[in-house]
Amino acid sequence: MGIDPGLTRCGMGVVEGSVGRPLTLVDVNVIRTSADLPIAERLVTIERGIDAWLDEHRPDAVAVERVFARSDSSTIMGTAQASGIALVAAARRGLPIALHTPSEVKAAVSGSGRADKAQVGAMVTRILRLDAAPKPADAADALALAITHIWRGGAQARIDAALAAARGRSR
């Protein structure tokens, strides 16, 4: 499951598959909150939405976009708060969690860490064999996170297992 955190729009996408095999869209959605509501109420809405999706889809892992400082600092705090909610919801269930940077996700799905939203949406559409790009962009970004984690997370899990085995032999 991929989560593109945001206080106004929090994208969630579930993708099924494995490295070297075609990936399949399971579900995609965006939790929306109104800027007119107090922050605490907005965060509760996001938490309830994420909790419902985790309960419904029971993912093997959760990939969340890593919050980073960008030129538009007005959105960083809300993104960080929504990200924290996603991390807590997944951790409460004991799910493996991965954080992927936006450029890592763009590079994984499009081949360029500088891809724009349209390019990411187009590649998500192509990878998942969809008729149209998921809208809004937060939905496509959540799916791109899930795709990235399947492609990179599987490789990282094998590396981690090999390192653990090597440490076990050296003792």
Image (cartoon, rainbow, N blue to C red):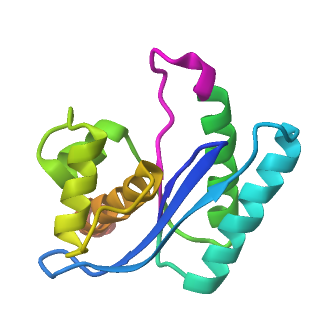
In the rendered image, which quarter is residue 164 located in? Answer: bottom left
Which residue shows up at 45% across the image and 58% down it?
139
Residue 140 lies, in percent from the top left, at 37, 57
In this view, which residue lies farthest toward the front?
A: 132
Q: Nearer the viewer, residue 90 or 130?
A: 130
Query: From this viewpoint, is residue 163 visible?
Result: no
Question: Taking 111 as reference, is 39 left or right?
Answer: right
Question: Taking 145 as reference, is 113 left or right?
Answer: left
Membership of 27 in magenta stretch: no
Q: Please tell me whether residue 74 is drawn above or below residue 113 in the rendered image.
A: above
Q: Nearer the viewer, residue 141 or 16?
A: 141
Membership of 69 in magenta stretch: yes
Which residue shows up at 62% across the image and 75% down it?
53
Which residue shows up at 39% across the image and 52% down it?
141
Quadrant of the frame with the C terminus = bottom left
Q: Which residues are magenta?
A: 62-75
Q: Please tell me whether residue 137 is drawn above or below residue 156 in the rendered image.
A: above
Q: Nearer the viewer, residue 81 or 154?
A: 81
Q: How many marks?
A: 0
Residue 121 lies, in percent from the top left, at 28, 54
Q: Please tell me whether residue 50 is drawn above or below residue 64 in the rendered image.
A: below
Residue 75 lies, in percent from the top left, at 60, 27
Query: From this viewpoint, is residue 40 visible?
Result: yes
